[in-house]
Image (cartoon, grey):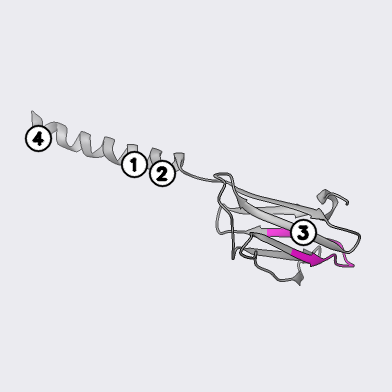
Amino acid sequence: MINALRPLSVVLLVLCTGFSASALAHNPMCECKAIDAEQIKCTGGFSDGSGAPGVTLDVIGYDETILVPGKLGADSTLTFKKPGAEFYVLFDAGPGHVVEIDQADIEAP
């Protein structure tokens, strides 16, 4: 009887491991604010409070051209000159960890 329960206990262990991994997941977060009429500062991180140094943060035109290629600095921020063309900001920390911020959603100074 004990050997018959062993496969069931292995299945339960695998399922519990899967649930605990999803419980530890963290969501990407990014916020951009205009410092003045010409400069924008974006800060990225994760919902667990961790920063995102080195994560890609690109400024992309509506025609999908990369206007300002960038990576977040050691303080998880990137400051850039506001492009003349319409744009959005793409915070890309990998699959499932992407945030897009349209220029219309960036707070004025």
Q: Quadrant of the N terminus?
A: top left
Mark 2 or mark 3: whose residue is earlier in sequence: 2
- Image disc number at residue 83: none
At label 2, the amino acid type is: Ala
**Closer to the camera: disc 4 or disc 3?**
3
3 and 1 marks in contact (CB < 8 Å): no
Dot 1 crowding, Cα within 10 Å, few <14, some 14–19, many 20+: few
Q: Which residues are magenta?
A: 79-90
CA separation in Å, label 1 and label 2: 6 Å
Mark 3 or mark 1: whose residue is earlier in sequence: 1
Image location of residue 43, percent across then percent down? 69, 55
1 and 2 marks in contact (CB < 8 Å): yes
CA separation in Å, label 2 and label 3: 33 Å
**Closer to the camera: disc 1 or disc 4?**
1
Figure label count: 4
At label 3, the amino acid type is: Lys
Image location of residue 54, percent across then percent down? 59, 65
2 and 4 marks in contact (CB < 8 Å): no
CA separation in Å, label 3 and label 1: 39 Å
Q: Which residue is mark 2?
A: 21
Would residue 67 be found to the left or right of residue 99 on screen? right
Check residue 84 for magenta coloring.
yes
CA separation in Å, label 1 and label 4: 22 Å
Mark 2 or mark 4: whose residue is earlier in sequence: 4
Q: Residue at x 33, y 37 (%)?
A: 16
Image location of residue 49, percent across then percent down? 57, 46
Q: Which residue is mark 4?
A: 3
